[in-house]
């Protein structure tokens, strides 16, 4: 049975990217403390941060969030592990990967999200790049486990296959999990990236307890920018109730994290209004 959020939205978590905090010059410029307080005042149960806003303050920010009654649900994200936007060279990738793990541990974040990066320069297709992803995640997983950090592979919509994620299906993400077989490795399911996948229910059942995160937004009918024009829940064509039914049917009982990149719309509005709309849409539509 699906959870009922109509009178209880304590499972709702804010990904701070929804207020523009992950890009320079975007959003209203609220301090991290102000965002924490605004979420707590509205009954959010959790929050997800980006590395760029944490800096050297991971322990302090984690404690501040928990003191306000918020769970630090996750941290975004590892570096790209492969592809044209990844750090140059294996050592640089793994050093940054370890730094992300250390930050997640200091925050006491529930999970560190992995966005794997696109197709490696000089290669064609995704097979070779996915193999390199598998090798690098396998190398990092024991270190993360020792720090108490869960890792979640997040498949991205195929539109990002070239530059941001050669991992585009939940099936392939679970294949990597199977190959590595680390108990602290699972998947993050983001509505924006998987709403179109007719094989998803079968893959979610396969995932079971390896679903470490569930991300909410919507896919607009006429998306103007595939990176920065996500919709608020209910404004697009994703079957959000059906998706949550499948995610929870697989055993997921964790937070529902709203992550909306919306440079021309939601990032232009008062963050207080954005948070209020999130609560209303979550309780009525998700």
Image (cartoon, rainbow, N blue to C red):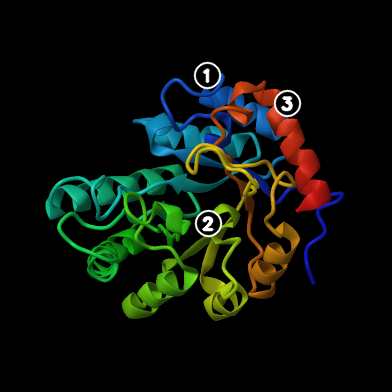
What residue is shown with label 2? 193
Mark 3, Cα crowd under 10 Å, few <14 / some 14-19 / many 20+, is few
Residue 50 x, y percent position in the rendering: 44, 38
Q: Earlier in the sequence, mark 1 or mark 2?
A: 1
Q: Earlier in the sequence, mark 2 or mark 3?
A: 2
What residue is shown with label 1? 29
Q: Specify the quadrant of the image occupied by residue 247.
A: bottom right
Q: Dot 2 lies on which element?
A: helix
The numbered mark at residue 273 is 3
Mark 1, Cα crowd under 10 Å, few <14 / some 14-19 / many 20+, is some
**Taking the image as drawn, is residue 43 in sight?**
no
Tell me the residue at 39%/49% (across/down): 105
Instruction: Locate the N terminus by quadrant.
Output: bottom right
Q: Is residue 156 left or right of residue 280?
A: left
Q: Label 1, label 2: how many angstroms apart (C-alpha)?
A: 27 Å
Q: Is residue 79 above or below residue 170?
A: above
Q: Is residue 261 left or right of residue 114?
A: right
Tell me the residue at 60%/72% (across/down): 198
Q: Is residue 138 above or below residue 100?
A: below
Q: Say which of marks 1 and 2 sits in front.
A: 2
Residue 133 x, y percent position in the rendering: 27, 64
Q: Say which of marks 2 and 3 sits in front.
A: 2
Q: Dot 1 lies on which element?
A: loop
Tell me the residue at 68%/68% (across/down): 248
Q: Label 1, label 3: how many angstroms apart (C-alpha)?
A: 15 Å
Tell me the residue at 12%/51% (across/down): 89
Q: Earlier in the sequence, mark 1 or mark 3?
A: 1
Q: Is residue 118 left or right of residue 227?
A: left
Mark 2, Cα crowd under 10 Å, few <14 / some 14-19 / many 20+, is many
């Amino acid at each position: 049975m699906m959870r009922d959020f109509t009178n209880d939205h304590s499972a709702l978590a804010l990904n701070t990217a929804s207020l523009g905090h992950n890009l320079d010059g975007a959003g209203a410029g609220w301090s991290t403390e102000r965002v924490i307080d605004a979420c707590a005042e509205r009954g959010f149960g959790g929050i997800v941060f980006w590395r760029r806003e944490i800096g050297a303050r991971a322990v302090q920010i984690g404690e501040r969030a928990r003191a306000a009654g918020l769970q630090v649900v996750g941290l975004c994200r590892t570096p790209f592990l492969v592809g044209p936007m990844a750090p140059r060279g294996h050592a640089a990738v793994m050093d940054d990967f370890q730094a992300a793990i250390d930050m997640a541990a200091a925050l006491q974040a529930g999970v560190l999200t992995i966005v794997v990066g696109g197709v490696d320069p000089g290669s064609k297709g995704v097979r070779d790049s996915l193999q390199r992803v598998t090798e690098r995640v396998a190398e990092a997983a024991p270190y993360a486990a020792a720090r108490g950090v869960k890792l979640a592979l997040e498949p991205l919509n195929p539109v990002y296959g070239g530059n941001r994620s050669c991992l585009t299906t939940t099936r392939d993400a679970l294949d990597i999990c199977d190959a590595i077989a680390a108990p602290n490795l699972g998947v993050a399911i983001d509505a924006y990236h998987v709403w179109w996948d007719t094989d998803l229910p079968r893959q979610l059942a396969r995932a079971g307890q390896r679903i470490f995160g569930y991300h909410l937004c919507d896919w607009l009918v006429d998306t103007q920018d595939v990176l920065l024009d996500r919709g608020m829940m209910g404004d697009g064509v994703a079957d959000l109730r059906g998706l949550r039914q499948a995610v929870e049917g697989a055993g997921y009982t964790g937070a529902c994290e709203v992550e909306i990149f919306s440079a021309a719309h939601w990032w232009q509005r008062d963050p207080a209004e954005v948070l209020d709309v999130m609560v209303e849409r979550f309780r009525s539509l998700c």
